Image: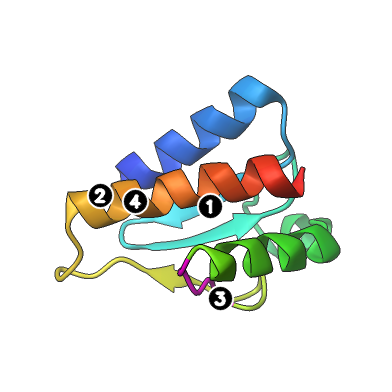
Amino acid sequence: MGDALSERLNAFTRERGLPLQCAQYKGVFTLFATRNPVRNLADAKRADTGRYARLFHAMLDRGYYLPPSQFEIGFISAAHTEEQLTGFAQAVEEAVEEVW
């Protein structure tokens, strides 16, 4: 499910030319406000923390609590369903359109 989530979000932002990356490994993920893939701390430090903060609040308005910092991670657990992750992805897509 982590792969499907990151692939969907990265395809969405890539198609629109938006600076947002979903870095993911198995069931953990982080959204970074940057155009480039984040593979290490130096990449992460180049991300726009102000824009991420706006995304964080836009997601709160939609009922989702992201990690408050790009330097933290979100978790997908065995309790999550595909339907829930689809709803989350849709909320991110809406919030991204609002923030950018």
Amino acid type, callout 1: Ala
Separation of disc 3 and disc 4 at Cα?
17 Å
Amino acid carrying label 2: it is Met
Q: Nearer the viewer, residue 41 or 81?
A: 81
Say which quarter of the image contains residue 3.
top left
Badge 4: few (under 14), some or many (20 or more) residues near its Cα, within 10 Å? few
* Secondary structure found at label 3: loop
Residues at marks 1 and 2, CA–CA distance in whole angstroms = 13 Å
Which is nearer the N-term, disc 4 or disc 1? 1
Quarter of the figure with residue 56: bottom right
In terms of sequence position, does the residue under pointer 2 or pointer 4 come before the other?
2
Measure the alpha-carbon separation of dots 4 and 1. Answer: 19 Å
Q: Main secondary structure of the magenta part?
A: loop
Left or right: residue 48 compared with residue 10:
right
Q: Is residue 22 magenta?
A: no
Query: Are there few (<14), some (14-19), or many (20+) residues within 10 Å of tag 2?
Result: some
Residue at left offset 25%, top offset 49%:
1
Which residue carries the number 1 mark?
A: 23
Image location (x, y in percent) of residue 90: 43, 44
Q: Nearer the viewer, residue 43 or 67?
A: 67
Question: For the magenta stretch, what is the residue range?
Answer: 63-67
Q: Secondary structure at mark 4?
A: helix
Q: Which residue is mark 4?
A: 87
Q: Are marks 1 and 2 in contact (CB under 8 Å)?
A: no
Using the numbered discs, state the Cα–Cα distance from disc 2 to disc 3 in whole angstroms: 19 Å
Mark found first going from the N terminus, 3 or 4: 3
Where residue 75 is drawn, which disc sits there? none
**Amino acid residing under circle 4:** Gly
Question: Residue 1: which numbered mark, if any?
Answer: 2
Q: Which residue is mark 3?
A: 67
**Residue beneath the point at 74% across and 40% down:** 19
